[in-house]
Image (cartoon, helix red, strand yellow):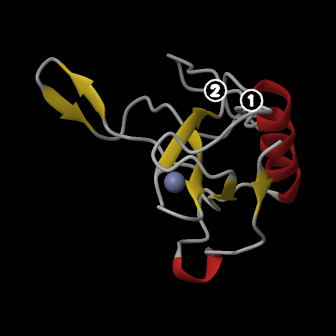
Amino acid sequence: MPSFSAVSWGDILSSDGKLTPAEREKAVAWINRKAPQLSCPSCGQRKFTLGENYLAPPVWYGGNMMLGGISYPMFFLVCDNCFHVMTYSAIASGVLVPSQPAPISETPEPNEKGEK
Ligand SMILES: [Zn+2]
C-alpha cells in the first residue's frame, strides 16, 4: 500500500473547503482499497501527502469558463518526492457526500402569521 505523510499544509491554505478528519480517513481508505499498488506515475516512489482542501477546476462551457456554476470536487495526492499531483473525484469515491440543495420554489412561501 502507498503511505501517507503527516505533513500538513493547512497553515498555508484557506480553511474553506477542507476535508474533515472523517473525509481524510475515507480518502486514505479508498486509495488503499482501490489502488493498493499506487506509485507516483512521474518518479515511481510510493509516499504521498493528502491535500487538505478539495479542488474544483473551472468547467469548460461552450468555449468559455463557467464560474459560479456546477463543479466537480476532487481530493488530491501530492508525491512527497517529485510533487506530482494526482486528483480523484470526491463525489464518485464517496469521500464527499454533497448536501441536498434546497428546493427552488417559484412562488413565495406564505407568511406563517399572515403578515404582509
Ligand atoms: Zn513522484
Badge 2 marks a residue whose secondary structure is loop
Q: Which mark is residue 35?
A: 1
99 left or right of 65 in image: right
x then y, percent, for residue 94: 77, 28
| Residue count near mark 2 (Cα–Cα under 10 Å), binned few <14, some 14–19, many ≥20 | few
Q: Nearer the viewer, residue 24 or 4?
A: 4
Q: Is residue 35 above or below residue 23?
A: above
Name the amino acid type tagged 2. Glu
x then y, percent, for residue 11: 61, 83
Q: Quadrant of the C terminus?
A: top right
x then y, percent, for residue 47: 69, 57
Ranked by sequence position, the earlier of labels 1 and 2 is 1
Q: Does mark 2 have its CB less than 8 Å from ligand 1?
A: no
Q: In 3D space, how far apart are the residues under numbered discs 1 and 2 (Cα atoms)?
A: 49 Å
Q: Residue at 38% across / 40% down in the picture? A: 57
Q: Residue at 59% across / 34% down in the picture? A: 88
Q: Which mark is residue 109?
A: 2
Q: Which mark is residue 60?
A: none
Q: Is residue 83 above or below residue 29?
A: below
Residue at the extreme front of the image, as rendered = 44
Badge 1 marks a residue whose secondary structure is loop
Task: Determine which quarter of the picture holds residue 18.
Answer: bottom right
Name the amino acid type tagged 1. Ala
Q: Residue at 83% across / 41% down in the picture? A: 1
